[in-house]
Each structure stands twice: as structure tokens, then as C-alpha cells.
Image (cartoon, coloured by chain):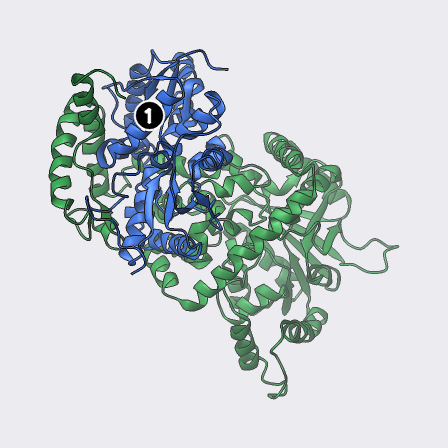
Amino acid sequence: MQSRSHRFKENAREAIADPHIQAAMAKMKVGFTGKRLAAAARLPEFEALRDAARDIKNHSLANLDFYLERYEEKVTECGGQVHWAPTAEDARKAILDICQRVGAKTVTKGKSMISEEIALNEHLENAGIAAVETDLGEYIIQLRKEPPSHIIAPAVHVSKEQVEADFRAQHQHLPADRSLSEPTDLVNEARQILRQRYLDADVGITGANFLIAETGTSIIVTNEGNGDLTQSLPKVHIVIASIEKVVPNLEDASTILRVLARSATGQEFSAYTTLSTGPRRAEDPDGPEEYHVILLDNGRSSMLGSEFQEMLRCIRCGACMNHCPVYHAVGGHSYGWVYPGPMGAVLTPNLIGVEEAGHLPNASTFCGRCESVCPVRIPLPKMMRHWREREFEKHLTPTSFRSGLGIWAFLARRPALYRRLTGLGIRALGALGRRRGRFRSLPLAGGWTKYRDLPAPQGKTFQQLWAEKQKNGGSSK
Amino acid sequence: MPKPEPKVGLFVTCLVDLFRPSVGFAAVKLMEAAGCRVEVPELQTCCGQPAYNSGDRADTRAIALQVIDAFQSFDYVVAPSGSCAAMLKSHYPELFDKEPDLRAKAEELSSRTFELVSFLTDIMQVSGVEAAFPEKVTYHDSCSGLRELGVRDQPRKLLSSVNELSLVELPDADICCGFGGTFCVKYPDISNTMVSSKTESIENTGAGTLLAGDLGCLMNMAGKLQRSGSDIEVRHVAEVLADMTDTPAIGVADGDVQSRGN
């Protein structure tokens, strides 16, 4: 996917002016947060489980090479094949090779952010293979030719009315007078359309929430059951997963599953938790004939041992963006690439470079709400700050801002000079603003006064007044 | 229990020093009433957050060392701001990760540093104040104080002891107001969207006064309320707790009480 992260500010401005996006965000910002809070409150050990989940991911990352090789051995033992993909290009090629070898014309797909990351659909379409998204949200945005705006709710920015209009435009073979006013009408229509596509598909592609080293199993969680049909009906099942998805065993995955859905949607568990281990065995009633796993690195291994390693704990629940006031203001598309919100602000510069995605870690107030709900306790604000440090080191911080900061820091390090100059400046500003008590505009303060008044200072600094008080009697009372 | 008459160094914070010294005097009054001896070291300027949050670690470290030195001789270091207190308490030690000696000094400062209101309640065991404020007020929890220092119940507890004051809770009091230090001028459009949603909630409470514990957030919300024509007054919580509300509210001119109800 072509990145638009560098024009984050413009994207944000457009999103703020877009009533559809603002209406969708107003709705989502109360929905997800309330449900998560209730789910966490219902489970007394929720905080302890977050610690356990963090520890499992830390252990897996500390021994990633071991668990990945063990995972590959097990997949092979079960009759499957692991394809190591250092880059997005390698992953696309491996998938297209398999599809072409089996003569695939239609590929059904479960929801996968890795597929977005490697821009798989476009690649398959260019090779003449139809890629059909089967998750309802993904199906909607595929019709709209849009990228997802949220990692677990890809069409969260689209209203019910917009979906109805899209369905009427795209499904013209259906009666024009059918009712599509209720969400269930829309779900049923998508189901009806997709049912045939499942049966037509030659290859089914799913993502993975976990890869289990001990058994060679991959696990997905869904709420629609679309993943099950995607991976069990076609002759070939391809799992695409990034390397940090591996955990030692099923016990570990179960622990993390207990915080995943609660953090994401407030459900105890997603409606479907589906395990797949290798192709169909002789005694199995059904299942694919071929089972492939594409293991994608795409920059992740270089995060190991860096100040961004903890980001690899992320289990893609979306809680950080569900709770982010910046995300609520600008929506997911503003971030300009695959991963929005706080997790995207940390991960995206790692994957596509801080030169392209530098705005993302800067567009945060460090309010810390994301970290406070992260099920694996990723210190997201701290890592955004690390990106700002890298940008500062590389002189990517805008020059005007940098020189302003330089002057300020020069003074802040010289208290006597600072006191003298601020005393003078504040007196002047105080005199200017005395009549109204505030400024509607002020030179060099346009960023502030564009949208709000600037309160005028009281006239003297605290340090001046304090010194006067000490001189006039010593007591501060 | 704290030792009798502890010596407190007031970390004024740059915004209070420059824009609203009356908050500093309110802090001094509250701490003296609680039995502290308060001094104000001259060698303080700012906690260093503007540099820290802009990725300028070298200047941040220099400023941190200056603050550590300036506040060496105090039993406690107290700031009328959750954000600046959290900078000293939670972030200074991280600046010296690879230098055990400096880190130890930063941690020592951290152990003595507190945000004003939580210092009064948690350390000085203050359970009520001598003040009156005949107003319906609402309270915004600033992010750093709330999430980094756990300041939530403390201001509500002390406010409940203020005569004639009634507190109406602000829905989403825990959501950022969009200030974020340099964020509000680097991303003014986003900051505006955030503060607009905040001031809408504030107005919906029907309160006549908004209180909080951080001047940055207060100036942001006051500036937005005033720009949109609201007559809600905005003050630092310390002013009300110290019974020092004769000074005009934030952004209001001297002698010009904001017209109410017109």
C-alpha cells in the first residue's frame, strides 16, 4: 500500500472537515471504551492476566529464533510448508507462486493486516486472480476501494447508510426494491453473495493471531466464522503471519486470548477461535490438501534489541486506537498507511521509515490512555518519544521549531538570564493584555490563537513577586 | 506521618511563574497551612518537558541536573502541576539509564517529589481546607497527574470540604483536553478538535467554574471557552482550595468579572 503518512497534517485536516468520519468517530469512541471497561471489571484477574500476557510475549521475543524454528519443524511434520519471507516482495511472490502453481482463479481471504501490509490483493488482481475479502468490514472497504481505517474494525469509518448505497450499486443483480435498512439485512446480503465465492475459491488465505511453536498450529479469532469457511473449503490454505506472532504453546495462547477480545471489543471471547494444523489428514472428513505458512519479517527482526522491541508484543486488539483522542479526532485513514492510532505511530516508522512516517509519533499529547489499556502493557508514549529523539538526532525536526526550542533551552539552562528576560517579557505582555485579560491574536502565537484566546499573564513573574515579598518582611504569609 | 514542619521546595513550574503567579501563592498558602516551611529556589526555570517531548535529550538532561541540584536540600519538592511533577518523578530517572550515579540522584529526587494536591492529602494528611466558594464547579483530570501519578480522588476529597461548593462530575474527565505542550501549536487543527469536544462536555455540565490541577490544560480550555463565547470561569484548583479567588479567573481582565448569564 502506497503510504500517505507524510501528508498526515493534510489528511487530518480533511478528516476533521468530513462529517461522515466525525459522526463515525463520535460513535466509536464511546462504544469500544465502555465495553472494554465492563469486560475488565467482570474479571477480577484481568490486571494479572495483562502481566502474564506481557511476560509470555517477552519470553517468546527473547527466544524468537528458537520458537520460530520449532514452529517450522512442527508445521513440516504435520505435512505443511513454511516459507520465510524477509520482505513484503518475498511474501507476495511466495503467495502468487502457490496460487499460479495450482491454477487459482479465485482466492478467498480472511481478515489479515499482514495482507494489507504487503498489498496482496492488488498483487493478485494484477496477476488476474480475484481476491475476495470475506470479513464483512473488509468486504465493504474492498467494494469501496479503500484501505482499512482500524485494525479490527476496518470499516468503522463507514455508516450503515453508506454501506447500503455501496451494496445497491455493486449488487445490481438483486431486486432493487429489497430492504437494506437494518444491519442484519446488510449482513445477510453479504453472506448470500460470499457463500458462492467460498465454494468457487481455489485458495483460502487467512492471517494468524497466534502461531504455536509446540504444535505447529495457527490460530485466528473472528466473529463471523468467515475464517473457517475460507480455510477449510478450498484445496489450498495459506496462512500469512509476521514472525512475532509465535508463542511457545497452546496454554500461552489461551492466556493471551483471555485479554485479547476483552481489550478489543469487550467480549469474553470472540465468537470463533479457530485452530488449524497442517493439511487434511487421511481420516479427516474435510480440510485443504495443501497447507502453507508465509512467515513475514519485513523489518521486524531489526526491532529486536532496539528501543522498539516491546512493540513486537502487540497482539493487534485495537484498544490503543479505541481509546486515543487523536484517533477519535482524525480517524484511521489520516495515519496514511496500514496501522493507525498509537500502535501505528510506533510501528509504522519501523516498517516504512521515520522520514516517511515522522508525523505519526509526533501527533500525540502523551496523554497515556493507550498505555493504560494495552493488554500487553506496551509503553507506547515512551516509544513515540524515542522516535522523536531519532528525528531530532537526524535533524528531521522542522528547522523553525528546532531553533525556537534551541533559544528556549539556552535560556532554561541559565536561570539568572532566564529570570531577567522572562521578567521583562511578561511585564510587556501583561501590560498589553491587561485591558481584556486575554489575546485574540498575537505575533508568533498563531498556532495557539488560531482557535483559542491566549490568557494574558498577570504582569509579574512569581519569582519577582516572591523576591519582593521576601524583601518586605521575609514571611511568605 | 511526615516529620514536623518539613522543608518544602516549591517547583513553581514555568507557566505558573510566567502567567499565573497567584497559583504559586495559593500553593504556598496551602502548604504553610498544612505545617510546611516553603522555600522557592531561584535556580529553577522549567522541568524540561518541551525539550524532552521534542526528542532533545541533551538539553533535557542539562535541565534535569540543574533541577536536581537546586532542590537537593529539601525534604519534599512540590509542584502545582501533575505534568511537571511527573516529569521530575517518573521521567528524570529514565534520562540517566546508563549512568548509575546520576540515576541514583534522579531517583532520590523522584522519591521526594509530589504534585501539590496529592502531597497535601497523601503526605501531609490534610483532610479538609478552610475555604468557601459558592459555585457549581466541574473538574478535569489532567492526563499526567491522573495516569502517571494516580491523582484522582485527592482533589475531589479536598474540594468536598470547601464551603458552599458543589461539584458536578465532568463526563470523560479522563480524556485529554488536547493541550499536550508543544502538540497544541504543532497540530492546531487536531488540538482544536479535541479541546472543542472537551469544552462541549464542560458546558453540558451546567457548571459555572471549571477547575483542574495543571495550568497548561487550564489555559487551553479557558482560551477555547472564551473564544466560543462561554462565560464559564476557569481556575487552578489550588486557588479555590486556598480560598484565593479574588484574583480574576484565567483570561479575565482585572476588575472585569465575566458577565454571567447574559
Q: Amino acid at mark 1?
A: Lys
Report x, y in % for residue A285: 86, 60
**Which quadrant holds residue B9?**
top left
* Residue B247: x %, y % from top left: 25, 39
Please identify the quarter of the rendering in which residue A460 is found: top left
User: Depth check: A36 or B247 in front?
Assistant: B247
The picture quadrant where one finds residue A30 is bottom right
Q: Colour of chain A?
A: green
Taking the image as shown, residue B87 lies to the left or right of residue A77, namely left
Residue B176: percent from left, percent from top: 42, 46
Q: Chain of mark 1?
A: B
Q: Residue at x 58, y 64 (%)?
A: A137
Specify the chain shown as blue: B
Q: Which residue is mark 1?
A: B29
Density class for disc 1 (Cα within 10 Å; few <14, some 14-19, many ≥20) is many
Residue at x 47% of width, y 15% of height: B2
State left or right for residue B262 relative to residue B131: left
Residue A118 visible to an observer of this rendering: no
> In front here: B115 or B250?
B250
